[in-house]
Amino acid sequence: MITYSLQSGSNGNAIYVEAGDVRLLFDAGVSGKTAEGRMRVRGHEIRDATALIISHDHADHMRCAGIYQRKFGLPIYMSARTHRAYRENLGHLKDVRYFEVGQPLRFNGVVVYTVPTPHDAADGAVFVVEHAGRRLGILTDLGHSFAALRRLLPTLDAAYLESNYDPHLLATGPYPLSLQARIRGSGGHLSNQEAAALVRESAKRLRWVVLSHLSEQNNRPELALEAHRREVGPRFPLYVASRYDLGPLMSL
């Protein structure tokens, strides 16, 4: 299995995963032109993707889903509730394949488990991609450190994990109190410290973690890495998904 993020953050999200002969895109928050160009840097064509799988109805995860289908011919997998919540922004879609969050998707030997989250979306999900005994988590926009997430992480071999904000930067930054409360609340995002505690609890099996969905205003890569290093030590393989470009090419 190989994987990389095309971009990760509130300015747009998309993650590529290739396992066997299955090529999956998770989310469509970056433009078609950008996605196509960044995949070509890695020798991949977006038109060859088996499917586009949407996690939830927020614009930074699905604003370009309609373009990906109309321009590149990708079938879109999402829940019916997610589609209804964002339908007016997508334009006409010819190939939408609904799934119930909590039910698995199957693609020629690859299983994608869909896991419901408490994030403040219409029907939010995170994903576990399983192939040949390896399990990769795509875990962002989590809401809070909920019980199913804590049970899930120790079963994974690697993960993209949200590490959204530094509490001090959030408290002293430009966001109004109402938005700060939303981010810290049960439907918001994980702080560096919350994410790091999850990694510490699961580090025995995890081979690597890519810290993802970092806030531009309320976080910095070095702060996220520092928080995790305090919990898991200097040798655990940690990486950061860029808000502005391709993330690291990872294998499993």
Image (spheres, rainbow, N blue to C red):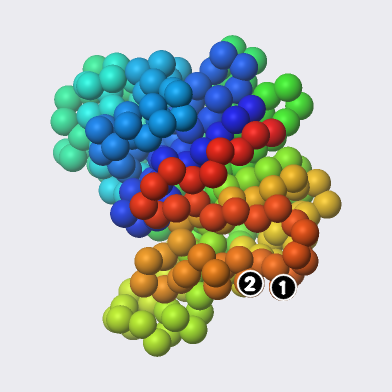
Q: Amino acid at mark 2?
A: Ala
Based on the displayed image, in which of its 4 quarters is residue 39 positioned?
top left
Side (left or right) of 122 relative to 118: left
Q: Is residue 163 something that shows in the picture?
A: yes
Q: Residues within 10 Å of mark 2 (few under 14, many from 20)?
A: many
Viewer-proximal residue among 195 and 123: 195
Q: Position of residue 96 (x, y in %)?
A: 33, 22
Side (left or right) of 122 relative to 228: left
Based on the displayed image, in which of its 4 quarters is residue 176 positioned?
bottom left
User: Among all residues in the image, which is located at the extreme right?
Assistant: 204
Viewer-proximal residue among 102 and 68: 68
Q: Secondary structure at mark 1?
A: helix
Q: Residues within 10 Å of mark 1 (few under 14, many from 20)?
A: few
**Can you say which quadrant of the picture contains the C terminus?**
top right
Q: Position of residue 208 (x, y in %)?
A: 69, 48
The label shown at residue 106 is: none
Side (left or right) of 133 relative to 106: right
Q: Which residue is mark 2?
A: 227
> Which residue is rendered at x = 57% and y = 14% of the image?
21
Is label 2 in contact with label 1 (beta carbons under 8 Å)?
A: yes
